[in-house]
Image (cartoon, rainbow, N blue to C red):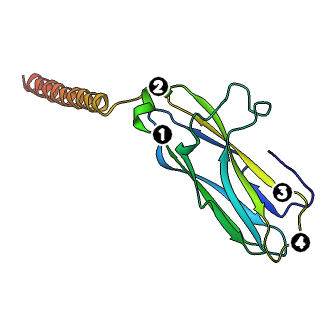
Amino acid sequence: MIFTSNSASITVQPAEIYIKMSNNFIQGNTTKKIVVTNVENHTVNVLAYLENPYPDYIRPNRNPLQNLSWITIVPFQSTLQPGSSKAFYLYLTIPEKYHETLLGKKWEVWATFREEPTNDSTSNTFVREYSVRVYIDTPQSIVSLESLRALISIYLILIASMVIFSFIILRYNKKRMKR
């Protein structure tokens, strides 16, 4: 649930993250970072987790992520001292056996950060949660290693042919100039 309050204890940035896989499926750290900052004068515990959006809140042309276990938030929990910030990272791993069936997908998942009570915090009547929308676009097609190698071979043959052709032309012109 996206919750906004004038009495927020933490800020979460950015509000949205895009993970676009162009040619292949990204594995591991997507290098996407979410920063949570404690803006209070007391310690705040933060619990991070993933959830699929509620149907009424999902963006048009997006679907819930098929399997939330494909994304991990690290760390999943942190205690923030007053004024401190903590970086949370998303790790995305889609098992290879699903790659062919997941081409052209557009998913939305929420990385949610919940304030947990601490011993030194004032009692909260409400549980505060802050969600970052994470948009994941899978590739339209996969560039296989074999096809990449074949393409490199073709380019190397083409370059070698151009060098040989240029050498022949230069030799021919040099002989022609001597006459």
Are the two marked residues, 2 and 3, in contact with CB atoms closer than 8 angstroms? no
* 154 shown above or below 4: above
The numbered dot on residue 101 is 2
Tag 2 or tag 4, which sits nearer the N-term? Answer: 2
Which residue is tagged 4? 122
Residue type, label 1: Ile
Mark 1 and mark 2: Cα distance apart in space: 11 Å
Mark 2 and mark 3: Cα distance apart in space: 39 Å
Which residue is tagged 3? 127
**Element type at marker 1?**
loop
Q: Indicate the quadrant containing the N terminus: top left, top right, bottom left or bottom right.
A: top right
Residue type, label 3: Val
How would you rate the neighbour count of disc 2 (Cα within 10 Å): few for under 14, some for 14-19, many for 20 or more? few
What is the residue that sits farthest to the bottom in this orientation?
120
Taking 146 as reference, is 171 left or right?
left
Tag 3 or tag 1, which sits nearer the N-term? Answer: 1
Are the two marked residues, 1 and 2, in contact with CB atoms closer than 8 angstroms? no
Q: Position of residue 14 (x, y in %)?
A: 72, 51
* 88 shown above or below 70: below
Q: Quadrant of residue 127?
A: bottom right
Tag 2 or tag 1, which sits nearer the N-term? Answer: 1
The numbered dot on residue 10 is none
Which residue is tagged 1? 94
Which residue is more in the foreground, 19 or 105? 105
Q: Position of residue 139 (x, y in %)?
A: 50, 30
